[in-house]
Image: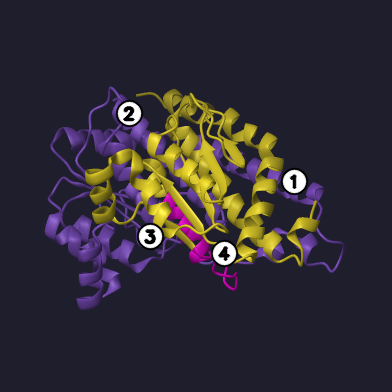
Chain colours: A yellow, B purple
Amino acid sequence: MHESVVTAAFERRVSPGTALSEDADRILHACRDMALRFQQGGKLIVFGNGGSATDAQHVAVEFVHPVIVGKQALPAVSLTNDVALVTGIARTDGLDDIFAAQLRLLAAPDDIAIGISADGVCANVSRGLDTARELGLLTVALTGESERDTPAVDHLLVARSADPLIVKEVHVTIYHLLWELVHVFIEQPDPAAAR
Amino acid sequence: MSEPGGLETLYPFLYAGLAEPDETQLRRSTEDKIAEIGTLRRSLAHLHGERLVACAQAMAAAIDGGARLFTFGNGGSSTDAQDIAQTFANPLAGTRPVAAISLAQDVAVLTALSNDVGYDLVFARQLAALGRRGDIAVGLSTSGGSANVLNALAEARRRGMLTVGLVGYDGGTMARDDLADHLFVVPSTSVHRIQEAQITLYHVLWELTALR
C-alpha cells in the first residue's frame, strides 16, 4: 500500500467539503427557524439509519449537553436509542414506520424534526419527515447527492458527494454549525430580526 | 469536554456591544469554519499518512488472524465509536464485514458497571470480559484525558490487544503516557473540528483496511 492512496483519499474530500460554503445561507436560515421553534418551547427530534443513527444521537447530545460551558441546554431526543422500542415497532408496523410511529407519540407542533440520510433517502427517514410535516413540525433534512427523491422539507441541506462516508463527514460539520448558530440566534432578542 | 473561550471567542462581533448580527457577518464566520475544517482535514494526509498506512496494515493483519474490533468513547465520541463499529461490521457493498462491538451501546452493562464499579472503568471492565490477545481496541477522546478511555487502552495493552487512539489538542495524557500503538493527534483546539477530522481519519483507516 502506497501513501499516494492516502493522499487520494483525502483529496476526494476536498471538493465536497469546500462546496458546503455555497450553502452557508441555507444553514443560516435553518438555524434562524430552529431558534424560533426553541423559543416557542419546541424540542428537537432527530433520526437516521446506520451511520446516520449515530449522527442522530450526536446531534441530540450536542443540544442537551452543550460543549461550551454556560450555554443553555436545549431539549433534543434521538429516535434511534431504544432498541426495544425500535425493534418492537419494526416487528408490528415494519421498519419503514420506526420513526413515524415514535413521532406520532412524541411530537408537538412547535417541535423540529431533523432526518439524516447519507446513502439514498431511506424510506423510514422519508416517512418520518412526512409525518413531522403533517404534524406541523419544522422539518430539516440532511442528505447526500445520491438521493433519488428530494424530501419535501422546510430546509434541505445536501452534502455534495455520493460517497456515504464523505457525506457523513460533511453532515457532522453541518450539524456542528446548526448547534452553534442556533445559540447565536437564541441569544438575540428577536431571531427573526437577524436578516 | 468543554471548549475554551466560548461563543464570545467564536463570534466576537456579537458581544462587542455593536449592532445586531447581520447575515453577512454570520455567513462569513460560517464560511470561515468550513474553510478551517477543510484546511485541517487536508493537513492530516501529510501529518498522518504513514501512520494511517502502518495502522491499516496492522489492523488488516489482526483481522486476518481473527481479531474483533472494540471501540469506545464518551458523548459525541461514543457516537463515533459506534460509527466505527458499524462501518466495519456492516461495510459498503463488496467489502468483508469485521466483527466489531461498540462498548457504549449496552445500557444494562454501562449502568451496571457505573453503579457498581465506577464510570472510569466502564470500558476497561468490558475489555477484560470480552477482549482476547490479538483483538483491536480503538479509543476516542477529543481531550486525550477521558479516564475511562485511558484505562481501557491500558487494559487492552495488558491483554495483548492492538491499540489505536484518536485524540485532539496536543494528545493529552493519551499521548504523554504512550497508551496507543497507533496514535492519531488532530492538532486543533476546537472540539467540533477535532471530531470532524477524527471521523475522516477513521473513514480513511477503514478504506485502507478494506483495500489491503
Q: What numbered label is drawn on residue B132?
A: none
Sequence-wise first label, 2 or 3:
2
- Mark 4–mark 2 Cα distance, whole angstroms, equals 34 Å
Residue at image coords 52%, 41%: A171
Label 4 or label 2, whichever lies nearer to me, is 2
Q: Nearer the viewer, mark 2 or mark 3?
A: 2
Q: Which mark is first along the chain, 3 or 4? A: 4
Count neighbours of disc 1 (C-alpha within 10 A) and say few if under 14, some if 14 to 19, many if 20 or more. Answer: some
| Residue found farthest to the front | A134
Do callouts 1 and 2 point to residues on the same chain?
A: yes
Is A69 inside the magenta-drawn segment?
A: yes
Determine contact: label 1, label 2, CB under 8 Å.
no
Foreground residue among A82 and B10? A82
Q: In 3D space, how far apart are the residues under numbered discs 1 and 2 (Cα atoms)?
A: 35 Å
Q: Nearer the viewer, residue B164 or A98?
A: A98
Numbered disc 4: secondary structure: loop
Foreground residue among B50 and B130: B130
In the image, the segment drawn in magenta is A55-75
Q: Which residue bears the numbered disc 3?
A: B174
